[in-house]
Amino acid sequence: MVKPRIDEEYVQMDAVDWQLFPDAFSAGGIRWKLLHVSPESGEWTAIYDCPAGSSFNAHIHVGPGEYFLTKGRMDVRGGVDEGGSTAIAPGYGYESCNARHDKTNFPVDSEFYMTFQGPLQFIEEDGTTIAVIGWEQAQGAWDALTGATAKAAE
Amino acid sequence: MVKPRIDEEYVQMDAVDWQLFPDAFSAGGIRWKLLHVSPESGEWTAIYDCPAGSSFNAHIHVGPGEYFLTKGRMDVRGGVDEGGSTAIAPGYGYESCNARHDKTNFPVDSEFYMTFQGPLQFIEEDGTTIAVIGWEQAQGAWDALTGATAKAAE
Amino acid sequence: MVKPRIDEEYVQMDAVDWQLFPDAFSAGGIRWKLLHVSPESGEWTAIYDCPAGSSFNAHIHVGPGEYFLTKGRMDVRGGVDEGGSTAIAPGYGYESCNARHDKTNFPVDSEFYMTFQGPLQFIEEDGTTIAVIGWEQAQGAWDALTGATAKAAE
Amino acid sequence: MVKPRIDEEYVQMDAVDWQLFPDAFSAGGIRWKLLHVSPESGEWTAIYDCPAGSSFNAHIHVGPGEYFLTKGRMDVRGGVDEGGSTAIAPGYGYESCNARHDKTNFPVDSEFYMTFQGPLQFIEEDGTTIAVIGWEQAQGAWDALTGATAKAAE
């Protein structure tokens, strides 16, 4: 019953290979590195490499998220021309709980780091849920891509 | 840009009328009182009155939740006979992030208070998402039931 | 690297003995039961039994907290007569992040359940910090009172 | 009583001037930009510019924090030579709830972005609390440095 403190973690980011982000949820060759998952609270952290012309499919941020755009440009919620935000590196953004992102586009080669509190709910145009992607699904996808489970079992 | 501190809140619980919980998500006449929503973090708090024989439909706790059963009995995740928990008042339970509750039944008249971090994802037996019910949907349902929006607009 | 889901928990509350709450932080014989700690997020949950005339020493809620007063009366932040809240069972309260409680008094025998996000910072009248009591300190105090660590080591 | 959704935020980071981080809590000329505060949950986000030879004073992370070191090198908890972590850009770190950082040093010019859940508790060597710095104190310090309050009042 006596619970220990959670361990600290460190990831040497340039020692981790980029993996393709599932094309069920993105287009144009977006790649990612999963950096951390928090099974208790459901938070997770990743960095994304987004080639010019790439985009994420429509989704709702079920909990708040924060991004740090380190390279390029990101049009969020349609970009400033459509009432959303246009981030230009170096840019910081806070996406609030239940923010709906119908369009997230990268007009130039871009990179951003993001902390997520809770899942992304990918949706159809009419709002129907396609999938709810939280820490567990993110970890599962990452493990499948990198073979972590297989290695752990050897 | 300078943000104020959030206000404290107090609810005299016996001065609030019970409302029927939507029967899209429950059966047997469950009633509730929504006590609090946290728009920033997506947390919400409610108390439920569950007649003998009532139940909640299958759902996933997208974030962790904690309950305090003040009256009666609640069979969670099928109850102890099926590998879940059987709570008997006074009982406390921690439902972890991503806990799946295919069956939550109340064999006798029961009452419980619960704090939710993030939404409930109601699902079909095959896992298909029916609805994701978070602070905003809970508040919307409560407002519709109690006419809060209409009163605010008068 | 692959993290498991957190376990669910259940506590049969009437099977746990009340323990005296440390008198460094309270007066008048307050007793408690620690129900849960969340080492990752720093949250913790407890129920308090507060005899008539008892009180908590001055403290700041470093994160938000929610209480459910199941019995009696609690004067929070001095009570309504001094601009605070007076809770009468059954009452619900949301104490926001950084709420300062110079006086929390129980004029009659009372009981409340509370979820804490983050620690309590006990302070002197001039604001000097006496102690910061979070999940880890709460667990340590509870273990010392109940001998949990000793039992675990047997 | 009907609460609105929280607004999204965007900060063009290179349009914000660096400010000196209070020397009560650091040495060697560390500068910062406060990017976000969350009054409800007590979270806050900042980026730090740390010249060669600079350091943070001893502190405890009262809640978990995550950093993204974008430039240079950071010796955390004494660095790897003393059982801690040594981050080399680009590096990601998760500092868990209650992690104690007696020494955080920057041997070369460095920069890191960090999200904090809850406050930093700055301490003396013997553990005595000097100050608990959360979203509200961070915002207050930032406002004093940038004159935000004064501007808002004009």
Image (tube, coloured by chain):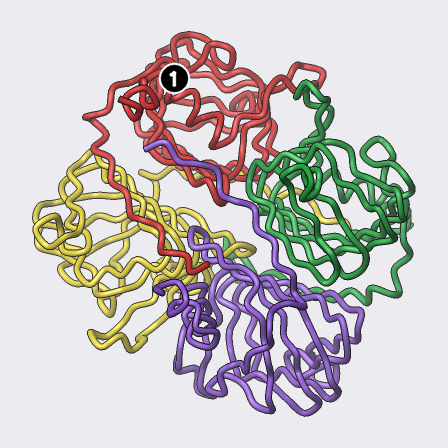
Chain colours: A purple, B yellow, C red, D green
The residue depicted at 60 percent of the width and 60 percent of the height is D6
In which quadrant of the rendered view does residue C11 lie? top left
The residue depicted at 44 percent of the width and 86 percent of the height is A124
Given residues D101 and D23, the one toward you in this image is: D101
In which quadrant of the rendered view does residue B126 lie? bottom left
Q: Would residue D135 be seen by someone viewing this image from the given angle?
A: no
| Picture coordinates of residue B57, whole percent (x, y) | 21, 65
Counting the numbered discs, the total is 1
Q: Is residue D40 above or below residue A62?
A: above
Q: Would residue D146 be seen by someone viewing this image from the given angle?
A: yes
Amino acid marked by disc 1: Ala
Quadrant location of the C terminus of chain C in the rendered image: top left
Disc 1 secondary structure class: helix
The residue identified by callout 1 is: C144
| Picture coordinates of residue B8, whole percent (x, y) | 55, 38
| Picture coordinates of residue C124, whole percent (x, y) | 65, 14
Decide if residue A17 is on the left or right side of residue B27.
right
Decide if residue A72 is on the left or right side of residue C151.
right
